[in-house]
Amino acid sequence: MKYIIWITSVIFFLAFVPATAQDAASPPEGTTIDEVVAVVGKNYILRSDVESQYLQMRMQGTIKGAAETVKCQVFENLLFEKLLLHQAALDSIVITPDQVNVEQERRMRYFIQQFGSQEKLEKYYNKTILEFKQELHDVIADQMMVNRVQENITANTTVSPSEVRRFFKDIPRDSIPLISSVVEVNQLIKKPPISPEEKFEVKERLRELRTRILNGESFEALAVLYSEDPGSAKQGGDIGLHGRGELYPEFEAVAFKLDPGEMSELVETEAGFHIIQGIEKRGEFSRVRHILIRPKVSPVALAEARSFLDSIAQLIRVDSLTFENAVRLYSTDPSKNNGGIMINPNTGSAQWSVEELDPKVFFVIDKLEPGEVSTPVLMEDEKGEEAYRLLMLKKRTLPHRANLQEDYNQIQEWALQQKKQEVIFEWIKKNANKTYIKMYGEYQQCKFAQSWF
């Protein structure tokens, strides 16, 4: 069942198979280039659909098993997709052009970022951005409808505690997964304020650079030398094409008004201070370069923050102050609102596997016992600004076989996923039997996971 659900997450990528790869997969001269291999309701599957997905898997190195077997799995994935599209039509599910456009822009931005620039993306695939969008519009609309129907099918699926226990009991003893070490960590962050003097100094440095550019020096060269944006500095400050809503509001408000070659006054954002120069505009996209300089916390203020946290740690160790109260009273970070819990962005929970932790954090908490507080640790926040923090190891589990006492939430998620798969199996069985489905060619001989007739 994994490969049936998998299909809804990869449809988009198939439109990006390079022309050279498509040529490599072309059949010998004199053979049929393409043909319909299945019809599901009013939707059809082409031989090229199967071959393209198989080729993409081969390029990604995700193929396991003989080619014929994998192609049969891809074919069944497509049957499932077309059945979902058929249901979307019956349910009158509508995806608006605005919804498609938002998703389309998000994916295009992702691909441009992966390649480094729009030009590199267009050159690699020998297609313009406009051609990409035209090809992807219907693909994305179909995928969004497929996802909507699949979500509707499993929307009301839940598992009770008894079902979780039954699920775990049915796992063969020698197949119970091994759970790696998991930790829960709390933090108290003390970030010193940036002084007005430091901000003034940064603005003066940027004004000097702006004057040098106006006097004829290269913006790109100065960006390489002085910009503190590591992602764009080595590109001469070029941040590539961006649509609206992707950048800091203050930055974007200026960037989209600049003509090619025009340079802004100083712009302040959460990241620091910028000067921006226009490069080009393409429809709804703007491309600019910038020089960023970040105001720094003074060494004196950092030393004071470290000393302050050291005194707080001493109070916690002698039980004069709880860690939770110290966080509430003294933390300067938004995590103070949840008691200083470090939230794992991958799961949204407080639990971290050792592999997910920042090595600098792991190095500190690895030496702590549960409930113990660290000495002040220097850190950088997401904007690259320095601060100090105390870390408290709240909980640590050792590597072990999964059990209901320590890993109930994880086992519950496994049980829920299995139940959702069973619901989808039943849905396919019920709806395939009342939908017109016709197969042609060699794929009729496939051994399917589901009964499609």
Image (cartoon, helix red, strand yellow):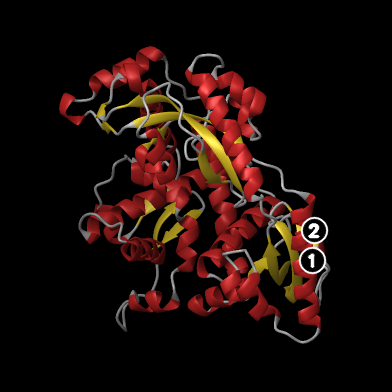
Q: Residue at x 62, y 66 (%)?
A: 133
| Whether residue 311 is situated above or below residue 127 in the rendered picture | above
CB atoms at circles 1 and 2 under 8 Å apart? yes
Say which element carries label 1. helix
Q: Residue 219 appears at what percent x and percent y?
A: 70, 79
Give the Cα distance between marks 1 and 2.
6 Å
In this figure, what is the number of numbered marks? 2
| Amino acid type indicated by mark 2 | Phe
Residue 386 vertical position relative to residue 305 in the rendered view, above or below: below
Label 1 environment density (alpha carbons within 10 Å; few <14, some 14–19, many ≥20): few
Q: Residue at x 30, y 34 (%)?
A: 180
Q: Nearer the viewer, residue 234 or 389?
A: 389
Residue 358 relative to residue 130: left or right? left
| Three-letter code, disc 1 | Glu
Pick the quarter of the image with the C terminus. Answer: top left
Give the residue number, with chain letter if any, for mark 1: 204
User: 391 left or right of 220?
Assistant: left
Q: Which quarter of the picture shows residue 53?
A: bottom left
Residue drawn at 23 percent across, 28 percent down: 176
**Foreground residue among 192 and 275:** 192
Q: Which residue is mark 2?
A: 200
Location of residue 376 in the rendering, given as x and y in whole percent from the top left corner: 51, 36
| Residue 213 drawn at (x, y percent) | 76, 80
